[in-house]
Amino acid sequence: MLDERFVIVGFILNFLGSLSYFLAVLRGQAKPNKVSWFLWGIFPLIAGIAQLDQGVGLQALPTFSATFCSFVVLLAAFFNKKAYWKLGALDWVCGALAGLGYILWQITDWPNLALMFAILADFLAGVPTIVKAYKSPETESSWTFLLGFINYVLGLLTLQALDFAHLSFPLYAGMMCLTFFALIQFRVGPRLAPKT
C-alpha cells in the first residue's frame, strides 16, 4: 500500500487534467455537455460526504477532486458557445436518484445508500458523454480522463480498509475515466463505424 498522502498527488494530476480540458474548451477544441459536468460535480460531492460520514478521511480526496475538477470544466463551458446545456429525461432521473439517495440517507442514517445512489446517478449523468465520446471523440480531451484515472488508482493504492465506503466510488470513477479515455484516444466509434 502507498502512503495515504499520495492522494494529494492524484488530486494535483486530476486538477492538471481538468485545467487542460478547461483550456481545450476555451480554445473550442473540446465541447463539453454542461449537464454531465454539472452533475459530475454534484454526485461526487454527495459520495464524498457519505465517505467522510463513515470515517474515510483523506482517502476521500479523490472523490472530492471529481467535484472540484468538474466545476472547473463547467466554468470553462460557459465561455464556449458550442458547449450545450440541455435537460433531458435522463438528467431529471439522475437528479431524482441523487435526491432520493440523500433523503433515504437522512431517514435511515445509512451513508452507503447515498453512496450507491450517487454512483448510479453519476453513471447515468455520464451516459450522454459516453455516447458523445463514442460518436464524436474529437469533441473531448482524452488526457483529462487519463489523469482522472491515475487519480483514482492512486487513491485505491492507498486504501487500508477494503469496504464499500472506501472502495466503491474510486473504483467506479476510475473505470469510467478509463472508458472515456479509451473511447476518445482510440476513436473507437469512428473506427467501428461502417465505411461509406
Image (cartoon, rainbow, N blue to C red):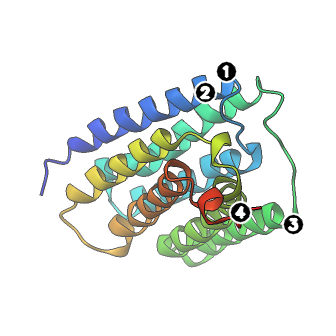
Classify mark 2: helix, strand or loop. Answer: helix
Between the residue at mark 3 and the residue at mark 2, the CA separation in whole angstroms equals 28 Å
Q: Residues within 10 Å of mark 2 (few under 14, many from 20)?
A: many
Q: Residues within 10 Å of mark 3 (few under 14, many from 20)?
A: few
The numbered disc on residue 24 is 2
Residue found 64% across the figure and 75% down from its top = 104
Judging depth in this view, the residue of 10 and 161 nearest the camera is: 10
Between the residue at mark 1 and the residue at mark 2, the CA separation in whole angstroms equals 5 Å
Classify mark 3: helix, strand or loop. Answer: helix
Left/right of residue 38 with respect to residue 172 in the rendered view: right
Percent position (x, y) of residue 16? 43, 29
To which residue does mark 3 refer?
Answer: 89
Residue found 30% across the figure and 55% down from its top = 153
Percent position (x, y) of residue 86? 87, 49
The disc labelled 4 sits on which kind of residue? Lys
Q: Are marks 4 and 2 in contact (CB under 8 Å)?
A: no
Mark closer to the chain start, 1 or 3 = 1
To which residue does mark 1 refer?
Answer: 27
The disc labelled 1 sits on which kind of residue? Arg
To which residue does mark 4 refer?
Answer: 195
Percent position (x, y) of residue 148? 43, 46
Quadrant housing residue 77 = top right
Mark closer to the chain start, 4 or 2 = 2
| Mark nearer the viewer, 4 or 3 | 4
Relative to 99, say whether 182 is above or below.
Answer: above
Left/right of residue 180 with respect to residue 1 in the rendered view: right
